[in-house]
């Protein structure tokens, strides 16, 4: 049974055993390429799905596409991130949104993230948001102001702050430079609907044109696509507040009960010791990884070497090391495929699966694989079965080298032999030179404890 840390209860909790489970994952704002930090957050959702699917649970996942309403700097008012990018690139907002949505789908596919069952776009779900806001007004949880904007009345939801610990009484007014918006009845209220006459705006039953706030989008789409009981909700740690607090207040107030059972958050990815972010200028895209000649799944493996709940500092060295491991494992699986078949190694597989169940302890599961790879008492056929069995969760395409005919370009075999000899004689300068000569022929060599391998 999967046990996972719930941010709201602050402890590791059981995920209830059921035939079907519903999971909502906060999706991308499609105004730029997703960086690998963003992708780490989506990997968390994929791992939860894969672990539960191996336990015969039918997963229904909804991951929204935010193509309107997310404002620059996550501010309450100001320019829309997508509109700002459209202006910069001299394209229409729709163009920008669809372009980066396609790029996002390609990136997530390259990381073997299983596609969610539902991927609603905010611009195509405006009626759901208007319906939800109308309901919140009717129930006394929200109020309109003369310009046609609508605010959520934070004080109408007394348990506000349970996810992040930011309780209402501690949220001091005027923490923003511009002070408290005079239209708000209470300083911690937030906009559900923002009055506007800009290009991307819709008419509302309460009068005036405008567009939805980012937080209300996730409430409306999750309630519509998954219903009023959602088993797991995931996102990056920075979404705890205000995004998830506001989403919880809206959804619970509309439904009249706790909608989300478990809130699960992935910690940040750092690069050069700082949170990876466009504003910091330290983003790495999946395309950059491919440009370095590395397999995109090396990113997946590198992420799984760390617990999702710990910050992780990524470096090019860790990515290169992951790439080598990935290639070696695929080559080993292809070798083992040639040996007599044998049942999987129950002990190793059980250990790895117990690690997955233990709050997604992927580093422990990977240690089991490393030990199994080295264990000479286990038949190759058994290693083959075990690796492929666990790859259903790991998602590393470990069987991709089976049957692949590897042909060396002319002259490369001799260079490989010379290099092996140079290494035996500890002539590292020659070994390095030969590595470059091989690279020029398109052959990449890697050194392992068992000698050199090539791809
Ligand atoms: P955004 O497209 O900016 O809304 O972010 C998409 C997702 O990526 C959210 O779940 C964020 O919490 C998450 N995220 C943003 N930066 C990082 C990072 N450096 N490491 C991990 N997740 C991140
Ligand atoms: Zn969201």
Image (cartoon, grey):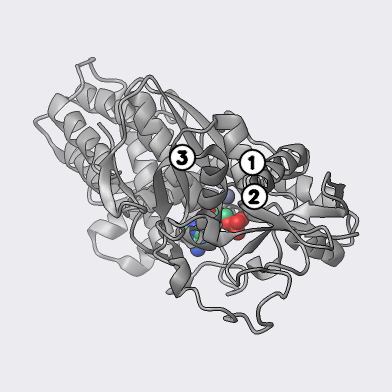
Mark sitting earlier along the chain (3/1): 1
The residue lying at 44 percent from left, 62 percent from top is 268
Number of numbered discs: 3
Quick one: 400 or 185, which is closer to the camera?
A: 185
What percent of the width, then of the height, locates residue 259? 47, 39
- Identify residue for label 2: 216
Between circles 3 and 1, the one closer to the viewer is 3
**Dot 2 and dot 1 residues touching (CB under 8 Å):** yes
From this view, report whether residue 132 is shown above or below residue 339: below
Q: Residues within 10 Å of mark 1 (few under 14, many from 20)?
A: many
Q: Confirm whether residue 181 shows in the render.
A: yes
The residue lying at 34 percent from left, 47 percent from top is 325
Mark sitting earlier along the chain (2/3): 2
What percent of the width, then of the height, locates residue 239? 51, 58
Does residue 32 appear to the left or right of 289 in the view shown?
right
Does residue 357 appear to the left or right of 167 in the view shown?
left
What percent of the width, then of the height, locates residue 294? 50, 51
What percent of the width, then of the height, locates residue 177? 65, 84
Mark identifier at residue 220 = 1
Whole-angstrom CA distance, mark 3 to mark 1, is 15 Å
Helix, strand or loop under label 2: helix
- Identify residue for label 3: 257
């Amino acid at each position: 049974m999967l046990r996972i840390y719930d941010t709201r209860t602050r402890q590791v909790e059981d995920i209830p055993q059921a035939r079907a489970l519903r999971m909502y994952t906060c999706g991308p704002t499609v105004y730029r390429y997703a960086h690998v930090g963003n992708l780490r957050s989506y990997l968390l959702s994929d791992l939860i799905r894969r672990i539960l699917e191996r336990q015969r649970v039918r997963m229904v996942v909804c991951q929204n596409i935010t193509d309107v309403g997310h404002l620059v700097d996550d501010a309450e008012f100001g320019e829309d991130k997508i509109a700002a990018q459209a202006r910069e690139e001299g394209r229409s907002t729709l163009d920008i949104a669809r372009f980066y949505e396609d790029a996002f789908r390609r990136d997530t596919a390259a990381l073997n993230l299983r596609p969610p069952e539902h991927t609603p776009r905010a611009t195509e779900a405006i009626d759901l948001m208007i319906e939800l806001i109308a309901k919140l007004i009717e129930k006394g949880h929200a109020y309109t102001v003369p310009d046609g904007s609508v605010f959520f009345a934070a004080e109408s939801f007394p348990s506000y702050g349970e996810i992040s610990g930011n309780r209402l009484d501690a949220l001091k007014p005027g923490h923003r430079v511009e002070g408290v918006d005079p239209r708000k009845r209470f300083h911690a209220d937030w906009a559900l609907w923002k009055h506007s006459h800009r290009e991307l705006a819709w008419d509302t039953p309460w009068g005036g044109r405008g567009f939805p706030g980012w937080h209300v989008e996730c409430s409306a789409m999750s309630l519509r696509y998954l219903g009023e009981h959602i088993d797991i909700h995931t996102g990056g740690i920075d979404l705890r507040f205000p995004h998830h607090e506001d989403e919880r207040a809206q959804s619970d107030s509309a439904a009249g009960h706790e909608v989300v059972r478990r809130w699960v958050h992935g910690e940040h990815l750092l690069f050069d010791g700082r949170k990876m972010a466009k504003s910091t200028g330290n983003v790495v895209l999946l395309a950059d990884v491919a440009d370095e000649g590395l397999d995109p799944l090396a990113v997946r493996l590198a992420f799984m070497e760390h617990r999702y709940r710990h910050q992780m500092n990524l470096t090019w060295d860790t990515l290169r090391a992951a790439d080598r491991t990935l290639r070696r494992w695929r080559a080993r699986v292809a070798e083992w495929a040639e040996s007599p078949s044998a049942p999987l190694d129950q002990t190793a597989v059980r250990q790895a699966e117990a690690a997955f169940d233990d709050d997604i302890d992927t580093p422990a599961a990977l240690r089991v694989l490393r030990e199994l790879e080295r264990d000479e008492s286990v038949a190759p056929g058994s290693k083959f079965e075990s690796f492929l069995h666990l790859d259903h969760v790991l998602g590393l395409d470990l069987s991709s080298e089976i049957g692949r005919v590897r042909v060396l370009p002319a002259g490369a075999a001799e260079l490989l032999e010379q290099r092996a000899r140079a290494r035996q004689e500890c002539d590292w300068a020659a070994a390095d030179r030969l590595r470059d000569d091989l690279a020029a022929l398109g052959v990449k060599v890697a050194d392992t404890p068992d000698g050199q391998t090539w791809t």
